[in-house]
Image: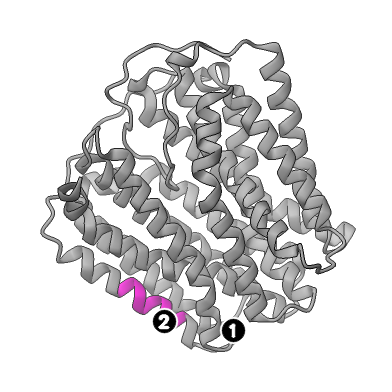
Amino acid sequence: MRSSVAAVGSLILGISLIQLANGYIGTLIGIRLADAHVDALVIGIVTAAYFVGYAAGAAVCNRLIGRAGHIRAFAAFGAVTAAVILGHPLYFDPVLWSGLRAITGFGAAGLFVTTESWLNAKATPSTRSQVFAIYMVATYATFAGSQFMLNLAAPASFTLFALAAILFCLALAVVATTRAEQPALIAPVRLKAGELTAAAPVAVAGCFVAGLITGAFYGLVPVYAASNGRTVPEIAVYMALAITGGLLMQIPVGRLSDRFDRRIVAGAVALAFAGLALALVPAHTTRWFPLVWLLLGGFMSVIYPVAVAHANDRLPAARAVSVSGRLILISGTGSALGPLLGASAMETLGIGGLFQCMAVVAGLFAIFALTRAIGVRAPDAKRQRPFLLLPAIFSHDLAAAAKEPTGRA
């Protein structure tokens, strides 16, 4: 185990620096747009642009990695993203920023695909879960900690953008000088049209809903908080709490989904999220607010991994790469639509409309998942693969040793 971690230690350090920078830039963009009194719908479009670029990057960057190799691809994606981040403070214009955010999303997807495919290739079947657990803890911790970087300078200054670019450049230096051997890409087995939806409709719906909710949340909560009179330090704390909740909830919910029907777990989690979101609509701060916010972020963050685990239970392991790639695109589509839907709800219903919108979406998915669980029998628990802490992007087969065909649900 120690040798496996040592082989990818510089890679995990590099992507953690990337997450430290990329994590707060999204929040900063929302605060800057809110401070400029940009319409909520326009803010939604700028936010959605990032996820459009992210989904596009997830779809095509494997070809670029195959041509250039992992190290050079990582350097290229990182350099382009750093340059684009520095472009934001040069000229404030929502249209320009939409384009810059799309390129940022594309670059971020490339960086995560490069990292995670590298980790998958270097980890052995016996150490893969542990390597990814370390990777997830490192990236979640830096994502949460990144929010406090907002306190280092005024949102309107050049400093925070420059600091993000510096962190990107440091990450490139760490990865470019690694002595670890880069892996070769493995060609995935392609899915037939409609195969995934027919095999695991709850997984498809769950990934779409998870993307929609998280896209709306991370893109518009800073706007919601700023409109509510929250200060930048308060916004940083709220975002960090939500991210920390996501990290803390992964293992207990994962273990529950290994013991029970994943559709029931996904539906229950979505229902809990919907209830908490509705409780936040009045926007009154009480002593229970931090706990509610922590749980909200936790339940929001586990819908996607449970849905992906459910999909992989229903299809042969040889298709795991294609399943993951398809679900990433579905989630990315939801993430792009989430800010637009949330912004429209905020304009129509007021700032509390964001949480009402997310609650309705989560509630509808919960009803669908629980109805499927009641109406369609789950497969034998012995054929259910163990839950794995899931990164943002799955690029390679994480279960190559499991060859059993699976049932439908």
Residue 263 sits above or below residue 116 on the image:
above
Q: What amino acid is labelled 2 in the image? A: Leu
Q: Main secondary structure of the magenta part?
A: helix
Q: Which residue is mark 2?
A: 163
Which residue corresponds to the image point at 76% horizontal and 66% vertical from the top-left?
40
Foreground residue among 365 and 86: 365
**Can residue 324 be seen?**
yes
- Place residue 334 in its image quadrant: top right
Looking at the image, residue 222 sits to the left or right of residue 397; the answer is right
Neighbor class of circle 2 (other Cα within 10 Å; few <14, some 14-19, many 20+) is some
Span colored in magenta? 161-169
Can residue 330 be seen in the rendering of this structure? Answer: no
Quadrant showing the N terminus: top left
Horizontal and vertical percent position of residue 141: 45, 62
Residue matched to label 1: 155
Q: Is residue 164 magenta?
A: yes
**What colouring does the structure picture have?**
one colour
